[in-house]
Amino acid sequence: MNGTFPMITDLKENENSALNLKKKNKACLADKLLQSIHGKIDPEIEQAWIDEVQKRKGALKSGDASLHSASDVLSEARKRLQK
C-alpha cells in the first residue's frame, strides 16, 4: 500500500471542510494559509494598501474617478500602441 493515500484523504477532507465554510471564514483561512507560505505581512505595507483602497473608494464615491471594464481598457491600450 502506498503511504500517500492517508495524506490524500486528509487533504480531500480538509478541502471539503474548507469549501463549506462561510465566506468570512474562508477569507480568514486563506489569509492564514498564505501567511504560512509567504510569512507575515508587514503592518506598514498592509496599512499603506488599506489607505490606498480607501482613497480610491472615496474618489469613486465623489465622482473624481470612474470604473472601466477590462475589455475597454485593453482596447484603448491596443489603439494607443498602434499609433
Image (cartoon, helix red, strand yellow):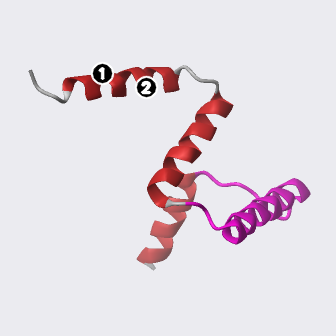
Say which residue label 1 marks. 9
Q: Residue at x 82, y 64 (%)?
A: 55
The amino acid type found where label 1 is placed reads Thr
Between 24 and 70, the residue placed more toward the observer is: 24
Q: Which residue is identified by label 2?
A: 14
Magenta-drawn stretch contains 71: no
Measuring from the top left, give residue 58's x and y in whole percent.
86, 59
Three-letter amino acid code at the position of disc 2: Asn
In this image, 57 relative to 67: left or right?
A: right
Mark 1 nearby-residue class (10 Å; few <14, some 14–19, many ≥20)? few
Q: Residue at x 64, y 31 (%)?
A: 25
Q: Residue at x 11, y 26 (%)?
A: 2
Q: Is residue 46 magenta?
A: yes
Residue situated in front as seen by the camera: 14 or 50: 14
How crowded pointer 2 is (Cα within 10 Å; few <14, some 14-19, many 20+) is rated as few
Nearest to N terminus: mark 2 or mark 1: 1
- Tag 1's secondary structure? helix
Please name the predominant secondary structure of the magenta segment in the image.
Answer: helix
